[in-house]
Amino acid sequence: MGRKSRFTADEKLKYINICIRGEDSITHTAKLVGVSKSTLERWIRNYESLGIYGLNNTSKNTVYSIDVKNMAVKDYLDGKGSLSDICKKYRIRSHRQLRDWILKYNSHEELKSSGMGGIPIMTKGRKTTYEERVDIVKYCIEHQKNYAETAKHFQVSYQQAYSWVTKYEKDGVESL
């Protein structure tokens, strides 16, 4: 059974324009309409990135390519923008979708192209020696703390690289 919204695209656009033109705040408009502030913010974000199409009710999940998923996750992890910024850039309809991809990436699961299989973009974390951890930290710092690149280069998880650099900066090389 398809999803059903209480509001048409035209109704959503009316409320969005009230906020965009500054006639009322997002919080107050959301309260008057009977939706959460985050819902109205999502409508605005979708309208700004997808146009009127972003306000249409969808009966199916949006399909994203593996490339879009990988680029969006990597941009976010590399600090190239907030969740909202990345969602707008890659025309992703929901923060939740991007967060799910990031969680999958960070828990070493494969990101797949929607419904079509895919390739792993990250290996599982692995045991390392003290010397390897020192090399990994040095490499990461030399590469402007690009944890994603470091993780890929050494085939460790993003969290491992981040954790070791953080420990190193806090307590020195002995903490590794």
Image (cartoon, rainbow, N blue to C red):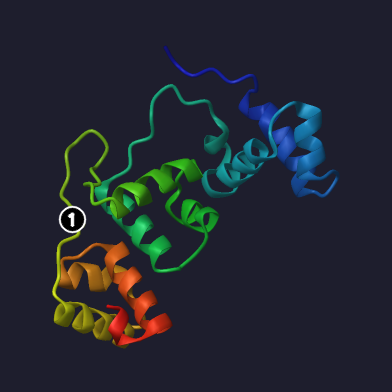
Quadrant where the image shows the C terminus:
bottom left
Assign a secondary structure to mark 1: loop
Left or right of residue 14, residue 70 in this image: left
Q: What amino acid does circle 1 point to? A: Lys
* Residue at the limit of the structure toward the top, as seen here: 1
Q: Position of residue 75 (x, y in %)?
A: 39, 63
Q: Position of residue 112 (x, y in %)?
A: 23, 43
Q: Between 15 and 94, which is closer to the camera in this rendering?
A: 94
Q: Position of residue 107 (x, y in %)?
A: 28, 50
- Residue found at x 37% / y 51%: 102
Q: Between 69 and 156, which is closer to the camera in this rendering?
A: 156
The mark total stands at 1
- Note whether 6 is above or below 31 in the view shown: above
Classed neighbour count for the residue bearing mark 1: other residues with Cα under 10 Å, few (<14), some (14–19), many (≥20): some
- Note whether 1 is above or below 5 in the view shown: above
Q: Where is residue 65 in the image (x, y as percent from the top left)?
A: 28, 45
- Residue found at x 23% / y 68%: 151
Q: Name the residue under label 1.
A: 124
Quadrant in the picture for residue 26: top right
